[in-house]
Image (cartoon, rainbow, N blue to C red):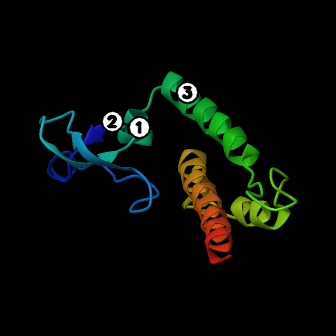
Amino acid sequence: MKFCEDCRIKKHWPRSTGFPYIGIAMNSKCEVCGKHTDCNDVPGLELVPDSEKSTEQRLLAQAMNNAYREKAEALVVTNVSGTRAGHLNHEKTEQLRKILVKVGTAVDWQATYDLRLRAQEGYQKDEQTKRDRRVYDK
């Protein structure tokens, strides 16, 4: 659900677990007041306090968490250029797997997946930049 900062404060809703790195939708429409601004992007299920969640909602949250865990653990970093292009970069993949977003003692796998995805994109862009510099320096 996308909502602006004003609505978040009025409704006492939390920010995304990975704020400010993830959970921000730039120039979006608030689903509460309709304002176009930078919005918090938080799954609607997270807006319901644990004490008020039904059994079905708890099971759904657990299933989503497990699915995001699988997706987060499947992310890898590959080499972009050179003789190893397309092959797994073990060092960067190991660094990627160390990224965890915790809420208390539990891991928030959706936030972890989103943050790992951003890190993976950053690693790939860094490799492309290095490759481009080598090509243009010749």
Residue type pointed to by label 3: Leu
As drawn, 130 above or below 10: below
The mark found on residue 93 in the picture is: none
Q: Position of residue 74 (x, y in %)?
A: 75, 44
Q: Does 31 sit left or right of 131 as displayed? A: left
Q: Does 58 sit left or right of 99 as displayed? A: left
Quadrant holding the C terminus: bottom right
The secondary structure type at the circle numbered 2 is: loop
The secondary structure type at the circle numbered 1 is: loop
Query: Does the CB distance between marks 2 and 1 fall below 8 Å?
Result: yes
Q: Nearer the viewer, mark 3 or mark 1?
A: 1
Of labels 3 and 2, earlier in sequence is 2
Residue type pointed to by label 2: Met
Residue at 59% across / 53% down in the picture? 112
* Residue behind mark 2: 1
Distance of label 3 from label 1 (alpha carbons) = 12 Å
Residue at 73% across / 67% down in the picture? 95
Q: Nearer the viewer, mark 3 or mark 2?
A: 2
Residue situated in front as seen by the camera: 98 or 87:
87
Q: Position of residue 41 (x, y in %)?
A: 35, 44
Distance of label 2 from label 1 (alpha carbons) = 5 Å
* Residue behind mark 3: 60
Query: Does the CB distance between marks 3 and 2 fall below 8 Å?
Result: no
The secondary structure type at the circle numbered 3 is: helix
Quadrant holding the N terminus: top left
Neighbourhood count class around disc 3 (C-alpha, 10 Å): few under 14, some 14–19, many 20 upward: few
The image quadrant that residue 22 belongs to is bottom left
Q: Does 64 sit left or right of 95 as displayed? A: left
The image quadrant that residue 105 belongs to is bottom right
* Residue behind mark 1: 43
Distance of label 3 from label 2 (alpha carbons) = 16 Å
Of labels 3 and 1, earlier in sequence is 1
